[in-house]
Amino acid sequence: MQSRESIQSEWYLDYYARVGADRNSLRHNPGVMFQVLGLERSFISAIRKVEHDPKLAKVLDVGCGSGGDIYQLLRVSYLPENMSGIDVQRDRLDGAAATYRSISFINGDAAKISSADSSYDLVFESTMFATLPDQKVSEAIASEMIRVCSPNGYLLLLDWRIPKPGAPNYSALTKQRLEKMFYLGQRTELVGVYPGALVPPVGRFLSAYLPSMYFLVAALFPFLVGQVAYLLRKKA
C-alpha cells in the first residue's frame, strides 16, 4: 500500500507536470496576483474575528508544506517561537525549516498528531483538504485538529468550496463536508465564512487582463467565489 507521503508527492508532481512550473508563481504568472490577494482578503477578514492575543497564542499549521502561507500568520502578529507546522512530505518541510528557523516543524502524519490535547489556540490549514480525496483520511485529520485545539480556541480553514470538473482526486471543502468533518454544532461552532479567490479560470483571466474588475466580479457574482475562509471555534 502506498504511503500518504508518496500519494501527496505524486499529486504535486502530476499537477505541476500538467500546468507548468510557473503555474502559481507571483513573479512569472500575471494570473496569480489577484488570486493571492483574494485569498489574503478571506484570511484577514477571518482573523479579525479571532478573540485572542496573537502574541501569546500557540499556533499549528497543518499540512504546512514548504511554509507558503506562514507569512500571513506572522504579519498579523503571531510569533514564530509560538508556531509549529506539520507535514507528511519531508522535502517540502525541509524548505519551510530553511526559511523559518524559529518555527518548530514536525515531519509526520496530520491524522496522528503527536501533540497533546488542547495544545494550540489556533489550528490553521490552507488548501489541504481540497487535495485529499480520501474522505477517511480527511476526517481523521479534522478530528486531530479539533483534539489539539484548546477549548474556545479557533480552527481557520482556507480552502476551495467548489469542486473542480474532471478532477477526481480533488475534493472541495463544501459546507456539507465541513459540517460532517468538524462536527459543527457538537464539537465546534461556525464563527463565519469569508469569501476569497474566484474560481481559477475566471480569477486568473481577470487577474492577468482585467485586474480592476476582479473584486467587482466577486461582489456581483458570489457563486464564482471558489475559495473561502471558514473560521470555527471549538466548544468548551
Image (cartoon, rainbow, N blue to C red):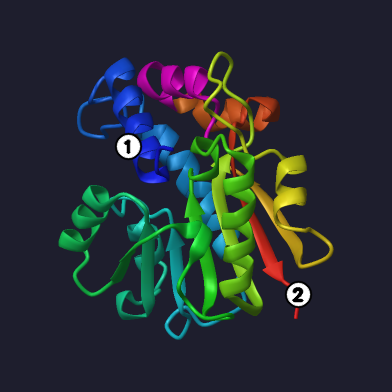
Q: How many labels does the image show?
A: 2
Mark 1: secondary structure: helix
Q: Residue furthest left?
A: 98
Q: Name the residue under label 1.
A: 9
The quarter of the displayed image where residue 93 is located: bottom left
Look at 31% across and 54% down and name the residue there: 67
Q: Which mark is residue 235?
A: 2
The mark nearer the N terminus, 2 or 1, is: 1
Q: Where is residue 73 in the image (x, y as percent from the top left)?
A: 40, 64
Q: Main secondary structure of the magenta part?
A: helix
Mark 2: secondary structure: loop
Look at 55% across and 25% down and name the residue there: 199
Q: Viewer-proximal residue, 219 or 174?
A: 174
- Left or right placement of residue 222 versus residue 115 in this view: right
- Left or right placement of residue 148 versus residue 204 in this view: right
Look at 42% across and 53% down and name the residue there: 63
Per the rendered image, the range of residues in magenta is 196-211
Whether 234 is among the magenta residues is no
Whether 198 is among the magenta residues is yes
Q: Position of residue 99 (x, y in %)?
A: 18, 60
